[in-house]
Image (tube, rainbow, N blue to C red):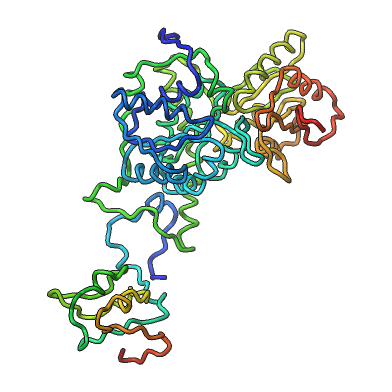
Amino acid sequence: MAEFELKKYDEIPIGGVITGGATPELNKTGDWRSERPIWDEDTCIQCLQCWVNCPDASFEIAEEEIQGIDYEHCKGCGICAEICPVDAISMKPEGEVSEDE
Amino acid sequence: MSNGNRQVLTGHQVVANAMKQVEPDVVAAYPITPQSEIVEYFSQYVADGKVDTEVITVESEHSAMSACVGSAAAGARTMTATASQGLALMMEIVYIAASMRTPIVMAVANRALSGPINIHCDHSDSMAARDSGVIQLYGEDAQEAYEFTLMAQRLAESEDVLLPVMVTLDGFTLTHTAQVAELLPDGAVTDFVGEYDARYPLLDVENPTTQGPFDMPDYYFEHKLQQVDAMKNVPDRFLEVQDKFNDIAGSNYDGLFETYKLDDADHAVVILGSTAGTAKVVVDELRDKGKKVGLLKPWLFRPFPGEQIKEALVDKEAVAVLDRSLSFGSSGPLYLEVSSALSEEDEKPRLYNYTYGLGGRDIKENQIAEVFEDLENPDLEKKMRYIGARQ
């Protein structure tokens, strides 16, 4: 769970409504992940299929090119590895991930 | 006060009329006996151009209530109607509608829950929703069903309430029988219900919101407390709505329940819905014979007005609570509430529980008279009695 200030019941909007928009960024869901997608920049052809299909918008992009993966929000579903036409993404169990990956 | 618009109408027709006069933005519903004609009549009004409402026909009640929640979250005034298995199928979303604080008004034409399958009246369907977080109003006749449907709209949308309201009317007994009802002019209803101004309309793209999100253990409890608070506000708001309604209708609503010859009564029955009408006839007959008997009929069942009902009953000698549904392995739902309301009192009436009318079983005047006769016995054994069941 992300660290938020815990408010009293009468200090929050009713009905579970979350105001302000774009709040998922605040909620770090990356620690749900059991497998990590490893992106190989050299193999990647920048087709952006991973970016299009990622359900958590976790592919970082700049000037229409993939820059890397936001591991604070990626839940490790593996859709990107499945959809990549050139196998530039592989899924690795978190326990086997080395520090530089 | 009569405005001269007295008509002979079925329960279906009065509820459909009330919906037409409220003119909701959206109605999403699925047909089920004995509710179907409510939405059929209403759809005819839409087809005839008499009301400007988006009617969404769906493939099930689960979808009906889901569409209603989406509509209400978007900021639209939303109504639906169902019964029995339809309400049971809808139940998952009924809880969600309450928790998302969507002020949906729904008619429930009370019908027994299967099984065995049965299409006739009892209260097992709406009682199954008693813990869902919806407000529940029980009407005795077509007139009350009409008036509660109108009042429900204002009650649901009250700023410190914002909860769905279920208006029940006994299936067949009220839905399919023609009664004299007095309808208000359209304009008076339009003014009475006013405009609905949603607090967090999902379609307000300038102020984006996330609705119906996931709650972890760190917030679920607090959101439930908000619902507790909203329910607490209902009795006062209902009384205010009644005042405003009396102004336009010339009616005399002034409470959370109706009492009939109760003030000086020694013995009383507590009963919901249409059977209260039969019981009033019995009260009159027994009064003619010099018996001091009376009746209490809750209009509001959720939230249950326990404190007020305690005040009304505490000085009685004996009270019978008549339930039209079972809670297997316990007492009837209405009895449990009345019993709980009186539990802290040192001096309180002898209290008894009867079950009647399951699956549409008729209940007759003589059977209610027998209940009052039972109450005269100071040694009457405490046990559930099943009126008219072959035992």
Relative side of B155 to B89, left or right? left
Query: Residue drawn at (45%, 21%), measured in percent from left and top?
Result: B13
Pick the front one: B74 or B16: B16
Query: Residue drawn at (33%, 23%), measured in percent from left and top?
Result: B190
Query: Residue drawn at (31%, 85%), measured in percent from left and top?
Result: A38
* Residue furthest left in the image: A63
- Residue A88 image offset from top left, x and y in percent: 26, 84
Relative side of B158 to B231, left or right? left
Q: How many marks?
A: 0
- Residue B88 image offset from top left, x and y in percent: 55, 43
Position of the C terminus of chain B by quadrant: top right
Pick the front one: A38 or A101: A38
- Residue A7 image offset from top left, x and y in percent: 41, 59
- Asked which quadrant contains residue B247, the reply is top left
Pick the front one: B281 or B256: B281
- Asked which quadrant contains residue B44, the reply is top left
* Residue furthest right in the image: B379
Query: Residue drawn at (44%, 60%), measured in percent from left and top?
Result: B215
Q: In the rendered image of this protein, does residue A79 appear above or below residue B92?
A: below
Relative side of B59 to B370, left or right? left
Pick the front one: B85 or B95: B85
Position of the N terminus of chain B by quadrant: top left
- Residue A40 image offset from top left, x and y in percent: 25, 87
